[in-house]
Amino acid sequence: MSTLYELTGQMAAIENALEETGGELTPELEELWQETGESLVNKVDNYNSLIIKLGDYSDNIAKRIKELQALKKTADNSLSRIKGHIKDVMVANGFSKLEGAYCKMSLSSSTSTVVDEDLLLQPYGGKIQKLQEQLPSWLTVEFKVNKTALKDAYKDKDVTPAGVQFVKGTTLRIK
């Protein structure tokens, strides 16, 4: 069985032989031409079948990924609701710790960073615009706020930039 590369090489060799014979198709060349042409057609069709099969397989995998993502979202939502329920019960009853035979649950204070990125980036709008004007049209820049660095930069300060809030809350820890 010949490869696609070999078959196209054979076709090129036949064309070269035709040029050498002044375009005269000898019985040997005609037989080789016929066999190579049929093999080439079969090879191309086989490749096409494989491409279709792999495309369908890829589509099925993509469909399964979507199904698994939906299942994951359901599990994550259930997990969040259960943890929220445990936290609410602990807060309502004044428990800061609960211990089971295999785990410990505790409440701890936490601070989350809430950011309005448009408002926070507004003072830098001119600089961002200048940077974008200097870049080629095929290059784009996206700015993101690093909430951890922002929290560290303002943790000991009484003032925060516009568009930033540090919200104190309670977190459930399970060990």
Image (tube, rainbow, N blue to C red):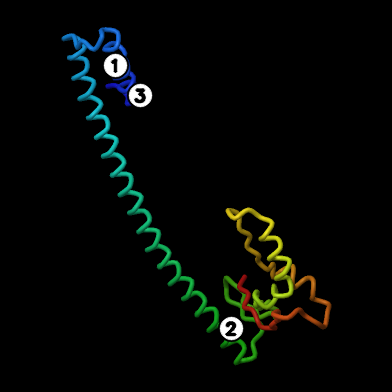
Of the residues shown, which amino acid type is indicated by label 3?
Answer: Tyr
Q: Nearer the viewer, mark 1 or mark 2?
A: 1
Which residue does the numbered mark 3 point to in the structure image? 5
Q: Residue at x 26, y 39 (%)?
A: 49
Q: Are marks 1 and 2 in contact (CB under 8 Å)?
A: no
Indicate whether 44 appears above or below 79. Answer: above
Question: If you read the primary sequence from the N terminus, does the residue marked by circle 3 or circle 2 appear first?
Answer: 3
Q: Nearer the viewer, mark 3 or mark 2?
A: 3
Q: Residue furthest left?
A: 27
Residue 135 is marked as none
Out of 22 and 117, give the one closest to the viewer: 22
Q: Estimate the x, y position of residue 28 in percent, counting from the top left.
A: 19, 9
Q: Quadrant of the N terminus?
A: top left
**CA neighbours of label 3 inside 10 A, class few (<14), some (14 to 19), many (20+):** few
Q: Secondary structure at mark 2?
A: helix
Q: Residue at x 69, y 56 (%)?
A: 134
Question: If you read the primary sequence from the N terminus, does the residue marked by circle 1 or circle 2 appear first?
Answer: 1
Spatial CA distance of label 3 from label 2 is 66 Å
Which residue does the numbered mark 2 point to in the structure image? 87
**CA neighbours of label 2 inside 10 A, class few (<14), some (14 to 19), many (20+):** many
Q: Secondary structure at mark 1?
A: helix
Q: Residue at x 33, y 47 (%)?
A: 55
Spatial CA distance of label 1 from label 2 is 80 Å
Indicate whether 94 appears above or below 152. Answer: below
Locate residue 95 relative to residue 81 in the image: left or right: right
Which residue does the numbered mark 1 point to in the structure image? 15
